[in-house]
Image (spheres, rainbow, N blue to C red):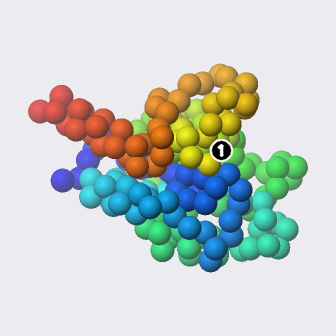
């Protein structure tokens, strides 16, 4: 049965669905063992899954937006938003700015307060905060550093949940769906 609880889940790539805290280019990227099952749980609830990722290697000619989109769509994402810029280019789409989330909301008529962001970096949490999304920080990838070393960079907000990994994050979302559906009956 489709859920009206969450309109979409936005998931970061590197360190969240696989890889590490470093960028791994398409064709070499390996998913965590629980990623596909976790994404299937969301899809089975009728919740669209969107990827959103900063990939500065694109602007250096090391990969293409199309390569990232193709690979992530093959993983099961419904749509993918990619920022191809380096941090010093001061673009509007690079996380921690919320532009990728705002664009997705406009294109898909989402109420971002009914959307969840799952990521491993402080920039994911700030983008979610600025867009008004729920925030789940995973401890994989750079997650522990986001909680400790870089906590000052996003001190204006708190995660709604700190998950061990994507599977834990999705289980938390599923618990929220069940809780809200039971209350609504």
* In-front residue for pair 85/91: 85
Residue 59 higher or lower than 46, as above or below: below
Residue drawn at 85 percent across, 68 percent down: 60
- From the viewer's perspective, is 4 left or right of 82? left
Residue drawn at 31 percent across, 55 percent down: 41
Image quarter for residue 168?
Answer: top left
| Residue 157 position in % (x across, y down) | 60, 24
Residue wearing tag 1: 142
- From the viewer's perspective, is 170 left or right of 148? left
| Residue 23 position in % (x across, y down) | 71, 60
* In-front residue for pair 135/114: 135
Residue drawn at 62 percent across, 37 percent down: 144
- From the viewer's perspective, is 138 left or right of 28? left
**Which residue extends farthest right?**
88
**Which residue extends farthest left?**
185
* Secondary-structure class at tag 1: loop
Image quarter for residue 127?
Answer: top right
* In-front residue for pair 114/179: 179
Q: Quadrant of the C terminus?
A: top left
Q: How packed is label 1: few (under 14 Cα within 10 Å), some, or many (20 or more)?
A: many
């Amino acid at each position: 049965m489709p859920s009206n609880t969450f309109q979409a889940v936005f998931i970061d790539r590197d360190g969240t669905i696989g890889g590490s805290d470093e960028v791994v280019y398409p064709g070499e990227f390996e998913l965590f063992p629980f990623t596909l099952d976790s994404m299937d749980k969301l899809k089975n609830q009728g919740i669209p899954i969107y990827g959103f990722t900063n990939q500065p290697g694109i602007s250096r000619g090391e990969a293409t937006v199309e390569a990232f989109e193709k690979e992530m769509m093959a993983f099961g994402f419904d749509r993918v938003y990619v920022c191809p810029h380096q941090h010093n280019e001061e673009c509007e789409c690079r996380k921690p700015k919320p532009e990728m989330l705002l664009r997705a909301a406009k294109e898909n008529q989402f109420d971002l307060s009914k959307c969840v962001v799952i990521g491993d970096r402080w920039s994911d949490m700030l983008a979610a905060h600025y867009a008004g999304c729920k925030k789940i920080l995973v401890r994989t990838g750079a997650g522990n550093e986001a909680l400790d070393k870089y906590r000052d960079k996003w001190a204006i907000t708190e995660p709604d949940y700190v998950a061990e990994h994507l599977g834990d994050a999705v289980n938390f979302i599923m618990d929220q769906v069940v809780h809200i559906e039971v209350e609504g009956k």
